[in-house]
Amino acid sequence: MGIVTSSLATGGRGQESSGLFGFDQIKNTAAIVRAVYDCLSLALERLGRGEALEAAVWFERALELSPDCADGHVGLGIAYAVDSQIYPALDHLQKATELEPRNFYAHLKLGQLYFKLRIPQKGYEVKLVT
């Protein structure tokens, strides 16, 4: 859950706190983190069973709650790739690498997709920021 929480530090919205010492925001952020985590868990479960479209629905729900969740973009990219929706897959994997330039898995999956598409030069160009 560490990766999810890092991209949810502001609840995905950058809201100002309305409560004393920001407790309301902390409470709301915790609820959002939990909901995103649950959506990602359900999506991964569906993806593991080969239900790519159902997994995509859950990844999309996670991204509705936290648009900057790199893990959600990676998962959605994989689900789209499994369902042969190549352009959306590329878009989401690229977005994940932009959100978290050091996310090895996002770079790996993006590079693998380029190689599968027989665009090896693009695959070689995918670089992890150090």
Image (cartoon, rainbow, N blue to C red):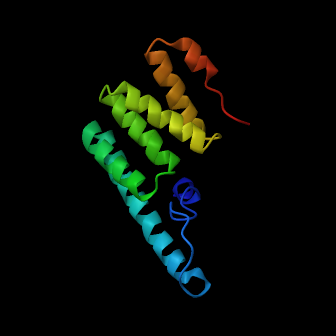
Residue 99: horizontal and vertical position, in percent? 58, 44
33 shown above or below 43:
below
Quarter of the image for the C terminus: give it: top right
**Residue at (39%, 54%) from the top-left corner?**
64
Whether residue 35 sits left or right of residue 16 in the image: it is left
Residue beneath the point at 50% across and 70% down: 29
Q: Nearer the viewer, residue 45 or 15?
A: 15
Say if residue 6 shows up in the picture.
Answer: yes
Identify whether 59 is placed above or below 32: above
Q: Residue at x 52, y 33 (%)?
A: 94
Tell me where residue 5 appears, x and y as whole percent.
54, 60
Choose top left, top right, bottom left or bottom right for residue 77: top left
Farthest-out residue, right: 130
Quarter-of-image position of residue 111: top right
Q: Is residue 51 visible?
A: no
Residue farthest toward the bottom in the current orientation of the protein: 20
Q: Is residue 47 left or right of residue 73?
A: left
